[in-house]
Amino acid sequence: MPNRSTKSGAIRRRQFIQSAAALGAGFMILPSGVLRGADAPSNKLNVALLGTWGRGEAHFGAISSENVVALCDVDEEHLAFAAKKFPDAKHYVDWRKCLEQKDLDAVICCTADHTHAFVANWAMNRGLHVFCEKPLANTVEEARVVRATYLKNKDKLATQCGTQRHANPNFNRVRELIRDGAVGELSEVYVWGNRQLRRDGYLPAAGDPPSTLHYDLWIGPSPFHPYNPGYFSGTSGLNCLQWNMYWDFGSGQLGDMGSHTMDLAWNAIDAGLPTSAEASGEPFNPEVTPVEMSATFEHPANDWRPAITVSWYQGGAMPRSPRPYIDLNKIGHGAMFKGSRGFLIADFESRLLVPFGDNADLTYYKSPKEEDVIPPLGHFQKQWTDACKGNLKTSCDFDYSGTLIEQMLLAHVAYRVGQKIQYDGASGRVTNSDEANSLLSRKYRPGWTLDG
Ligand SMILES: NC(=O)c1ccc[n+]([C@@H]2O[C@H](COP(=O)([O-])OP(=O)(O)OC[C@H]3O[C@@H](n4cnc5c(N)ncnc54)[C@H](O)[C@@H]3O)[C@@H](O)[C@H]2O)c1
């Protein structure tokens, strides 16, 4: 249950900050020594950074203009690392205790994937704005609970999922080309990622964790696996690759680069939840998520396009190139859109239009007027801090990103049951497989609550 006193304190402070931001521009004549407006001390967010090394470090710059009042990490050495930059912040090793700190406004979550949905829910339940690194969830159920918690609070809270490539102008150029008919009527979308991290199974027990690492808190809600330094042997910002292939700690490339690359398509297709998913790949390993896998989702028509299929390929599986002279394998992470008049192929920064067939004369493509081009998003993290103080609007809120990751995680369910599953997005149930329904969620260790 939310802590009511903490919650109301946070909400009062947040309302004050939002009013200050709204008024800021109007207060041009100030008594000397008094600062108002966006940079005023009273208009800074009180931020907690959860996960203070690795990806956490990538947030240092963006939050250094706010008040970083709390640092939380299961590794005390990583806490000490961030404390050099933010010496006034309080320290925690358990994020649940950190979220009880009374003066918080906002939380940035850079912990391991298997705690993301927990942190996001707990923080929102306490009236806190949340930036959560991708992937937003590890199971379909987690994605749905995070999205529902956000939708309950969307008039009060700003959320952003850490898919920062979304700020690349190319994302909106792709959207414009698709919406303005450059490939004709859209029918199929293919998204792929070719990173391959092969693991055999959970690492064997190998000694005791260092005294500075609170290993049991790192395991958190997941089933216990003995300590092995291999889970922590990666470089800063890439250590996630040491643990995210294991079912209890991550969702492999589907959730990792898949969150970024599906975003390139998701931004262009205005999709909700799929009505079906089917997937196949290498043989199932109960300990490790698959390297090679492909999945196809069916999406109903919306108000500007017909029903489409969206496919995801990973670990070597690839869509077929529309032309032999185009080698899709040279695009490590990419998306391709097929329409009645051609193809659009994109990576994160660039795009290639391939008009196709005898009628592909581009007369059907209505290029946008200069004033209608979608404006740049600006700095991705700043979009969120501005939203916390202002209109709460972000491009990758937990509705958009929650739906995206729910679709992706359905691929793992379909892969595991080995059949095409029919999905009812309204109820979050698979309608043709009890086994699939049992795989939408996972069991947590006693004492851990997803929506606390
Ligand atoms: N947006 C991106 O481009 C991008 C890039 C890299 C990583 N990430 C994401 O960031 C997250 C962290 O990745 P990483 O490579 O930095 O991993 P990491 O293993 O280095 O973890 C980051 C920090 O979080 C701490 N931590 C882990 N679990 C914690 C918990 N339960 N409570 C408090 N602290 C905890 C670790 O001790 C470490 O200091 C992952 O979810 C990953 O997917 C995103």
Image (cartoon, rainbow, N blue to C red):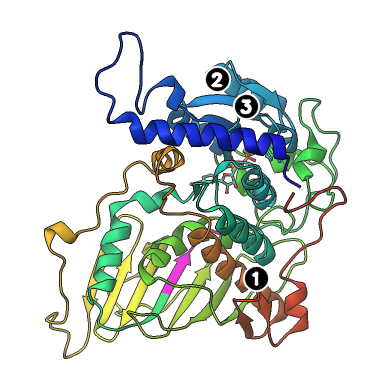
Alpha carbon distance from label 1 to label 2: 40 Å
Q: Which residue is mark 3?
A: 70
Q: Amino acid at mark 1?
A: His
- Residue 439 sits above or below residue 199 on the image: below
- Residue 112 sits above or below residue 178 on the image: above
Residue that protrudes farthest toward the top in the picture: 32
What residue do we see at 65% from left, 78% from top? 414
Q: Amino acid at mark 3?
A: Ala
Q: How many marks?
A: 3
- Mark 1 element type: helix
Report if residue 76 lies within the magenta region.
no
**Left or right of residue 209: residue 240:** left
What residue do we see at 35% from left, 80% from top? 303
Q: Earlier in the sequence, mark 2 or mark 3?
A: 3
Percent across and percent down for residue 149 are 62, 56
**Left or right of residue 355: residue 52:** right
Badge 3 crowding class, 10 Å Cα cut-off, few under 14, some 14 to 19, many 20 or more, is: many
What residue do we see at 70% from left, 35% from top? 5
Q: Earlier in the sequence, mark 1 or mark 2?
A: 2
What residue do we see at 61% from left, 73% from top? 411
Report if residue 195 lies within the magenta region.
yes
Q: Which residue is mark 2?
A: 86
Residue 129: name its quadrant: top right
Q: Amino acid at mark 2?
A: Phe
Question: Closer to us: mark 1 or mark 2?
Answer: 2
Residue 266 visible in the snapshot: yes
Percent across and percent down for residue 416 are 71, 75
**Left or right of residue 264: residue 152:** right
Q: Which residue is mark 1?
A: 412
Quadrant containing ligand 1: top right
Question: Closer to us: mark 1 or mark 3?
Answer: 3
Q: Which residues are magenta?
A: 190-196
